[in-house]
Image: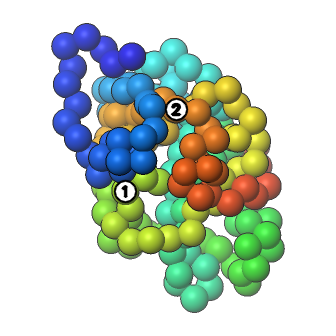
Amino acid sequence: MAKKGIHVSETPATAWLRAHGVAFTEHPYEYVDHGGTAESARQLGLPEHQVVKTLVMQDEKARPLVVLMHGDRQVSTKNLARQIGAKSVEPCTPEVAQRHSGYQVGGTSPFGLRKPMPVYVEDSVLALPRIVINGGRRGYLVGLSPVVLRDVLGARPVQCALAAS
């Protein structure tokens, strides 16, 4: 549950989750620039593998897409491109990612995106009993069942994880 005394105001992500009847828990933490999932996992006392990062990428035609990946893994863009039928995939610049998602980098959630985009989820994320994922602002994660990603959000499972270097 959320830390006592900390109130987190509604975000487009939490509004989307509520509108779709998704049960979630709130997990605010102290945001640290470039701390990533390692920092949020440390502060919340969770395994980094259970913290899911939301990455805004684009294909060779600059069409945006979202990849949901374990915090302690990286995306093989080559494997991802092959699985989604693209010639190549690369991360968007922070400015482009923000324009597509409507969220500030470091606070990007796959829920309540500004523009509709295809969403892909690393297959092994769906096997976890519970995940935490960004709730739409820096320093704020939400906990939920990973099947929400596939069954409610419509994320397509892929296998493109690499061990983080």
Q: Secondary structure at mark 2?
A: strand
The amino acid type found where label 2 is placed reads Leu
Q: Return the residue at label 1.
A: 112
Q: Is residue 65 above or below residue 154?
A: below
Instruction: Find residue 108 and report its horizontal and vertical position in percent.
Output: 40, 52
**Which residue occupies the foreground of this view, 140 or 162?**
140
Q: Is residue 105 above or below residue 71?
A: below
Q: Secondary structure at mark 1?
A: loop
Q: Is residue 32 above or below residue 157?
A: above
Q: Residue at x 41, y 25 (%)?
A: 25
Instruction: Give the residue furthest to the bottom.
Output: 61
* Quadrant in which the N terminus appears: top left
Of the two numbered discs 1 and 2 on the same chain, state the one appearing first in sequence.
Answer: 1
* Quadrant in which the C terminus appears: top right
The amino acid type found where label 1 is placed reads Gly
Q: Which label belongs to residue 43?
A: none
Q: Is residue 125 left or right of residue 136?
A: right
- Label 2, residues with CA under 10 Å away: few <14, some 14-19, many ≥20: some
Instruction: Find residue 139 and report its horizontal and vertical position in percent.
Output: 33, 34
Q: Is residue 56 left or right of residue 137?
A: right
Q: Residue at x 19, y 36 (%)?
A: 9
**Which residue occupies the foreground of this view, 106 or 103?**
103
Q: Is residue 140 left or right of residue 61?
A: left
Instruction: Find residue 46 and report its horizontal and vertical position in percent.
Output: 56, 20
Instruction: Find residue 96 and report its horizontal and vertical position in percent.
Output: 38, 72
Q: Return the residue at label 2.
A: 144
Q: Residue at x 79, y 70 (%)?
A: 83
Can the viewer see residue 33? no
Q: Residue at x 23, y 41 (%)?
A: 10
Q: Is residue 40 above or below residue 18?
A: above
Q: Is residue 11 left or right of residue 150?
A: left
**Which residue occupies the foreground of this view, 50 or 106?**
50
